[in-house]
């Protein structure tokens, strides 16, 4: 029972990291449309005042990645044959082949295109999945990399009050975007797409989790007491 609970918590941690990366991918796709493909475009207007707010959505998701990953790092689930990063690299490799041969986009630009096609978004989905497994096990890739991540963790602890403020502000805007897109879909039939349903779901989770981390004072305990003294 205890082992099953650990696996559930580990899965939850991976799901949060995956959601954060997927949120960033969705936001980047819309911002690409705003800046490169449709000059003057106002996505989800008039319910969303400006597409620039997706930068704040990206910020909210990025801030959530570190504490989400740390939830899983504290758990010892063992490994099946290889480290998680091996499977992450494997998923990334197969997805790269899929995107190259079965879509009109390249791996380099797939996140920078505003494309609601199923085949393109399927490629994005598996790329994000591979990145999630890779990020989850990143400290085990290299000792220097682990030391660098610990240095970042200690630095984040020192400016935790600033990070908390940024998390509150960006999380609030993420919830605003979620509400605005939902209202837009309810009033404009053209906005009712699978991509927008995914956008609403991921951004909603990002906003809610931002406030959960703030409420639980996650950044106050992001390093061990011993580490915080150095």
Image (cartoon, rainbow, N blue to C red):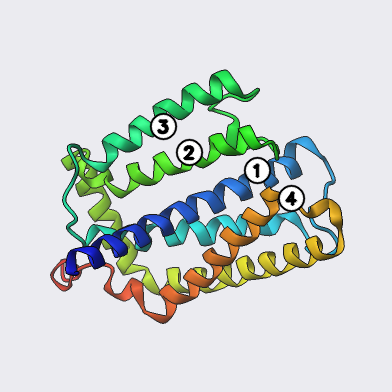
Q: Nearer the viewer, residue 175 or 119?
A: 119
Q: Are marks 1 and 2 in contact (CB under 8 Å)?
A: no
Where is mark 3, residue-wise? 92
Question: Between marks 4 and 3, how big is the CA–CA gap?
Answer: 26 Å
Residue 21: image location, x then y, percent? 49, 50
Dot 3 falls on a residue whose secondary structure is helix
| Position of 80 relative to 213 (above/below) | above
Residue 145 falls left or right of residue 211: left
Q: Is residue 49 visible?
A: no
Dot 4 falls on a residue whose secondary structure is loop
Question: Between marks 3 and 2, how big is the CA–CA gap?
Answer: 7 Å
| Position of 17 relative to 160 (above/below) | above
Mark 1 / mark 4, whichever is N-terminal: 1
Q: Residue at x 48, y 21 (%)?
A: 97
Mark 1 / mark 3, whichever is N-terminal: 1
Residue extending farthest to the bottom is 215
Q: Residues within 10 Å of mark 2 (few under 14, many from 20)?
A: some
Where is mark 2, residue-wise? 126
Dot 1 falls on a residue whose secondary structure is helix
Question: Between marks 2 and 4, how big is the CA–CA gap?
Answer: 20 Å
Question: Between marks 1 and 2, how big is the CA–CA gap?
Answer: 16 Å
Q: Nearer the viewer, residue 120 or 219?
A: 120
Where residue 215 sits, quadrant-wise, is: bottom left
Mark 1 / mark 2, whichever is N-terminal: 1
Q: Nearer the viewer, mark 4 or mark 3?
A: 4
Mark 2 / mark 4, whichever is N-terminal: 2
Where is mark 1, residue-wise? 29
Residue 83, disc: none
Dot 2 falls on a residue whose secondary structure is helix
Q: Residue at x 34, y 37 (%)?
A: 88
Where is mark 4, residue-wise? 193
């Amino acid at each position: 029972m205890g082992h099953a609970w650990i696996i559930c918590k580990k899965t939850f941690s991976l799901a949060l990291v995956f959601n954060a990366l997927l949120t960033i991918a969705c936001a980047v796709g819309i911002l690409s449309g705003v800046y490169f493909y449709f000059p003057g475009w106002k996505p989800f207007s008039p319910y969303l005042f400006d597409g620039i707010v997706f930068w704040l959505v990206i910020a909210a998701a990025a801030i959530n990645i570190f504490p989400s990953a740390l939830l899983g790092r504290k758990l010892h689930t063992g490994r099946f044959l290889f480290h998680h990063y091996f499977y992450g690299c494997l998923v990334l490799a197969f997805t790269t082949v899929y995107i190259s041969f079965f879509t009109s986009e390249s791996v380099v630009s797939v996140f920078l295109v505003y494309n609601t096609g199923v085949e393109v978004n399927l490629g994005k989905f598996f790329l994000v999945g591979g990145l999630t497994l890779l990020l989850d096990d990143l400290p085990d890739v290299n000792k220097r990399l682990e030391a660098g991540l610990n240095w970042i963790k200690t630095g984040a602890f020192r400016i935790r009050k600033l990070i908390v403020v940024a998390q509150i502000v960006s999380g609030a805007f993420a919830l605003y975007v979620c509400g605005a897109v939902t209202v837009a879909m309810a009033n404009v039939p053209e906005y009712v797409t699978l991509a927008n349903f995914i956008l609403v779901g991921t951004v909603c989770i990002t906003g809610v989790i931002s406030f959960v981390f703030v409420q639980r004072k996650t950044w106050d305990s992001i390093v061990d007491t011993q580490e915080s003294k150095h």
